[in-house]
Image: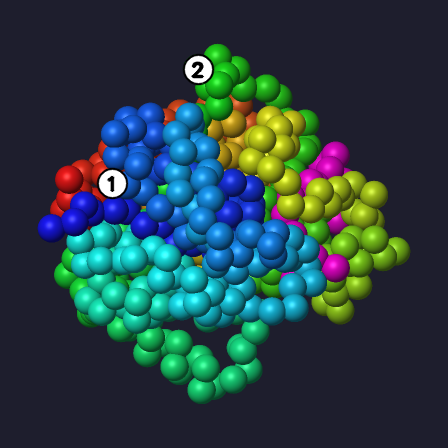
Amino acid sequence: MGKSRLIFYDTSNYVDFPIGGQLTSVGNLLRYLAECHPERTGDVVLVGVTPDPSAVGKLSFLERAGQRFRFLPVAAAERDLSHTAHSLRLAFARGLVRYGRQLKITRQDCNYVQTPEAVGPVRLLCPGARYVIFSHGSYRNMARGFRFYRGNPLVMKGFAAYLRYVLKHAALIFVLDADSEKDYKPYSSRIVRAKNTIALPENYERFVPHDFRGRLLFVGRLSKDKGVDGIIRALSLLPEATGLTIVGDGEYGDTLRSMAAAPGKPADVAGKETAGDKTAKPAGDRITFTGAVTPDRVAAYMEDSDLLVMNSAFEGVPMTILEALSHGLPVISTDVGGIGDTVRFGSDALATDGTPESIAEAVRAIARDYRRFSEAAHGDAKQYDYRTANAELYTHLQSVWKE
């Protein structure tokens, strides 16, 4: 019997693209393996994408936490997420079919799937291949985040059927929240609750809460479902807020930048009046768009902020929230997906209904008792440390990735 390898599949380059929770999650697992199980890193292969078209299809090496990992990029990715012309998911699947033979996948290997479109090509390359899913949110909501093919009912139905196949045949499914577990139970009994993980800041143990300064922060993909327009409208109702920093990029970015830059109330620009607009004030000169930045820069923005504001229509367990807690940032968010399983509303966070008015009121409520919320946020982050949480995941993973 050949040696079992752990082969990761993700639409990332495992270093700095795309910035977001999924990249942080897999990066923390690689860091855990490098630090705690260095003897096994030689059996790890990373399959992903690259912003360099000339590197597609060529095996190379990446270094994480002092260990080298083999890396095979199978598709080229565009860094400008606001103007992406093609489906990266589709390009990844096609590239895996084209270049995946270099992997020489066997039934002894454990295929660690972060992006479900990998499963079809993997099983085409090796019928009966074993795979493990790490699900960052329920697949039931996955098609809602598509930029391409959303208007094609045949594609949507076919993709839903494909996802059912993926769930039914997985050797193990890691989920982050109760909603995903409930959605997957009709298709599999091999479900394990896991945690997203973070690396605690270097100054974590020396944390001292400060007074509220009115600095709001959003971090994430700039897509319509993230509800960033509602956060911008809320800023117009908060003359006491000194600024809103929007970190990230995406297909909705141009719309949001135009909305923030236009004269008058952002609510008018979006074509939707804000109730109680007598208190509204222009927000554009208080908004900073950073674009996509490195994880180090995200941490720096968190250190310089007071609150993380999220407003998603659906979510899994956003890594951004865990990172914000570790910096002592209370969270304001809609109660969707696994967010309610992650924060303690009333202690380290407040829930909203997504309207600008409810967001503004939540900001004021936290500001009135800021130090208590900040201390609770900081303390609650410790359970998500990458070493503790990934040690549990590794124990389960060993049932498929055998010595």
Tell us which disc is closer to us: 1 or 2.
Answer: 1
Seen in the picture, residue 213 relative to 27 is either above or below; the reply is above
Q: Nearer the viewer, residue 377 or 391?
A: 391
Give the left or right position of residue 285, taking residue 52 as reference.
right
The residue depicted at 57 percent of the width and 58 percent of the height is 76
Residue of label 1: 393
In the rendered view, how is the structure colored? rainbow
Taking the image as drawn, is residue 318 in sight?
no
The residue depicted at 18 percent of the width and 45 percent of the height is 3
Q: Residue furthest bottom?
A: 154
Quick check: is 249 in the magenta stretch? Answer: yes
Give the left or right position of residue 330, taking residue 132 as reference.
right
Taking the image as drawn, is residue 225 in sight?
yes
Q: Residue furthest top?
A: 206
The 10 Å Cα crowd at callout 1, few under 14, some 14 to 19, many 20 or more, is: some
Residue of label 2: 205
